[in-house]
């Protein structure tokens, strides 16, 4: 059995952090990916890089590997200590256990790596998984509220463009990530990666989204605010008749429970926010009525201000 120096394969020191190992793996996997690489022996390098990442990227496997010490060189004849596997709950090895087994086979036997085993993210040759692809999915507020099926155009260097249909569930919020299994980069050696979509909801001309709650400004004329009125307000779930009480103030909020973003646990609410607006132009008759109101009204809007 020939020893493999996984740290050397990834080009990282033995005390490298998990982040450094992950970064090195991504760089080399891209460099040697058989579908795009022009490097000599790319497929063999790609297999070694995936194998090194599978061991060093897992804390338990890395600990087992590090127990072998740093005195071995790549290609050197190697046999693990008889009790080495037992230290990690995998059983020991006898000198007759190896036969035609190579270094990666030994780890596969210990930890169930490779196709059909524990390897998951990136297996060995025969079980290599394509890269995950990340993209942003833009939605209108209506699409996010009701749910929608969208067609996503994906283009990746070295791969043909493709269209993926995605079903977005109702009530999705900005920042949420949707995973679409098997729609990432294809692999000629096994399972395709996943498509990871980050949701972004665009601005709406009427509504504001804050968490699961939706806010709507409702303009009222001065006499509507004073006398009270009933208005039909738009809502994403359908219009609602709303009674505005007499004496409504600017900025006052009225809650319509359960009219916000739908959710399996707690649905959001719709908040109607009163805004008092003035007509930009008035007729002579309207002006006269305003002047009459000014002469008879005893309301003081500035009680704490100095009196003239």
Image: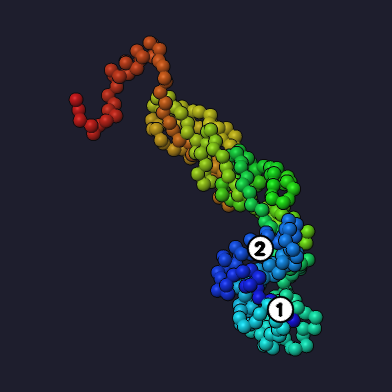
What is the x, y in percent for residue 30?
67, 59
Of callouts 2 and 1, the N-terminal one: 2
Q: Are marks 2 and 1 in contact (CB under 8 Å)?
A: no
Quick one: label 2, few (<14), some, or many (20+) residues within 10 Å?
some
Residue at left offset 66%, top offset 70%: 9
Quick one: label 1, few (<14), some, or many (20+) residues within 10 Å?
few
Location of residue 95 (image quadrant)? bottom right
From what the image shows, is residue 92 above or below residue 194?
below
From what the image shows, is residue 34 above or below residue 136?
below
Residue at left offset 45%, top offset 31%: 244
Question: Residue 249 bears which disc, if any?
Answer: none
User: Is residue 240 visible to the viewer in this orientation of the structure?
Assistant: no
Q: Is residue 246 left or right of 291 when viewed as pictured?
A: right
Where disc 1 sits, the SS reads loop
Residue at left offset 75%, top offset 65%: 41
Q: Which residue is mark 2?
A: 28
Q: Is residue 276 left or right of 80 when viewed as pictured?
A: left
Q: Which residue is mark 1?
A: 75
What is the x, y in percent for residue 144?
61, 42
Q: CA distance from mark 2 to mark 1?
A: 21 Å
Residue at left offset 43%, top offset 31%: 275
**Split into 4 quadrants, where in the image is the C terminus?**
top left
């Amino acid at each position: 059995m020939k020893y493999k120096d996984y740290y050397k394969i990834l080009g990282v020191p033995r005390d490298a952090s998990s982040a450094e190992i992950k970064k090195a793996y991504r760089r080399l996997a891209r460099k040697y990916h058989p579908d795009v690489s022009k490097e000599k022996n790319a497929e063999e390098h790609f297999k070694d890089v995936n194998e090194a990442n599978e061991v060093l990227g897992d804390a338990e496997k890395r600990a087992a590997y590090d127990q072998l010490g740093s005195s071995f060189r790549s290609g050197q004849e190697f046999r693990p200590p008889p009790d080495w596997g037992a230290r990690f709950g995998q059983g020991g090895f006898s000198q007759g256990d190896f036969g035609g087994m190579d270094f990666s086979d030994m780890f596969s036997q210990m930890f169930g790596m490779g196709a059909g085993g524990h390897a998951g993210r990136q297996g060995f040759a025969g079980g290599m998984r394509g890269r995950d692809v990340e993209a942003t999915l833009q939605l209108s507020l209506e699409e996010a509220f009701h749910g929608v099926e969208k067609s996503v155009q994906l283009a990746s260097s070295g791969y043909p463009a493709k269209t993926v249909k995605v079903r977005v569930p109702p009530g999705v919020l900005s920042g949420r990530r949707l995973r679409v299994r098997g729609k990432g980069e294809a692999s000629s050696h096994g399972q395709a990666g996943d498509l990871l979509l980050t949701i972004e909801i665009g601005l709406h001309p009427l509504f504001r989204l804050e968490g699961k709650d939706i806010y709507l400004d409702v303009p009222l004329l001065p006499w509507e605010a004073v006398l009270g009125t009933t208005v039909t307000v738009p809502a994403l779930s359908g219009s609602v008749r709303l009674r505005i009480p007499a004496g409504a103030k600017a900025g006052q909020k009225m809650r319509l429970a359960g009219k916000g973003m739908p959710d399996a646990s707690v649905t959001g609410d719709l908040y109607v926010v009163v805004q008092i607006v003035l007509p930009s132009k008035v007729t002579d008759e309207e002006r006269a009525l305003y002047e009459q109101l000014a002469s008879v009204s005893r309301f003081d809007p500035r009680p704490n201000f100095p009196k003239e």
